[in-house]
Image (spheres, rainbow, N blue to C red):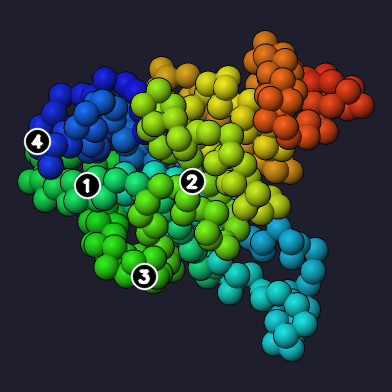
Amino acid sequence: MHPDPPPASDGRAGGWSVATTGDGTPTLAHPIHGETCHSRVGAWTEARERYIVGCRVPAGLARIPHGLRGRPLADLGTAAREGSGPAPQSTLPFSVLDVGTGPGMNLAALAACAAAAPGTRPVEVTTLECDPSVLDAARCLVAEPPVPKPTREAVEAARWLAVVVEALDRARAAEGSPVDLTERVRLILVVGDGRETLPERSETYDAVFLDPFSPAVDGSLWEPEFLRSISLRMRPGSWLATYSAASRVRARLAACGLRVGAGAALGTKAEGTLASPDLEPPPLAARRCRRLARRVPALCAELGWPIPPLFGASSGGFPSDLDLESGR
């Protein structure tokens, strides 16, 4: 969700403004502070490129889960049947945490990806939303009359957003129980303050879409303690993606023990951020690495947290452990 001034509004929905973004797909602007739920470069483009591609979701749906790699499929099946090991790839869900449901565009992109991805690995997505009014406002995005000559992105987004909005209505009625988003995707909607609701959950995640409003207007979901709650629930081989490239956000993620790097830029907007507990993200610029090297130890000392090994004195220092000249 973005601090950009909203594009021209073309409707109202319970105080939320309906706005058309650069790729022809709609989003919502907050009734008070005016931030939009997606980049004005394109709501669908951002959902797909920032979160689905950034978190390597297509690859995750097509492969064996991280902890099961290297074991023959026949052995996995035998172990599962005998109860002596984890289930094979086709029955272990790819698990997603979506922080900031908004109008559901990230969920729509996830559903579209799952429908197109090969294999049969199911998907479970837990989405956190503190403001139910945005879920009500999302209905108007699918009720809008079609525009002449819609873009390809607009056609695809409209198709999947209609599926998501209907599923979100059922998920609200289910009060935290899972519902079918699609045949392959199960959805759990958790309404409330994420700082309180996430610690109550037992799931772990292969992908995290960190997409609340900006720290300037909604700092609660960028607090170090909340980010740490997320990091503790990230599986080996998982990815977190966010639109924010703020140094303080990156320092907090790194203080949680995550490896932090650059996310793709959308249009003319600055790069976002990718983070993983054990995989190497695309490298940051050298000056940004030096900034993290100063900030992370100081932040850990302030919070009373141990300094992550990458930033400890015995590590040889950050960023010297990274190949800053390597490509993506």
Find numbered disc 4 in the image and state the secondary structure of the residue it sits on: strand
Q: Earlier in the sequence, mark 3 or mark 2?
A: 3
**Residue at label 1?**
133
Q: Earlier in the sequence, mark 3 or mark 4?
A: 4
Can the viewer see residue 50?
no
Where does the image place residue 132, in percent across and percent down from the top left? 26, 50
**How many residues crowd mark 2 within 10 Å: few (<14), some (14–19), many (20+)?**
some
Cα separation between marks 1 and 2: 19 Å
Q: Which amino acid type corresponds to the residue marked 3 in the rendered image?
A: Val
**How many residues crowd mark 3 within 10 Å: few (<14), some (14–19), many (20+)?**
some
Q: Earlier in the sequence, mark 4 or mark 2?
A: 4
**Residue at label 3?**
179
**Residue at label 4?**
11
The answer to whether marks 4 and 2 mark residues whose Cβ atoms lie closer than 8 Å is no
**Residue at label 2?**
195
Where does the image place residue 260, in percent across and percent down from the top left? 66, 31
Snapshot quadrant of residue 63: bottom right
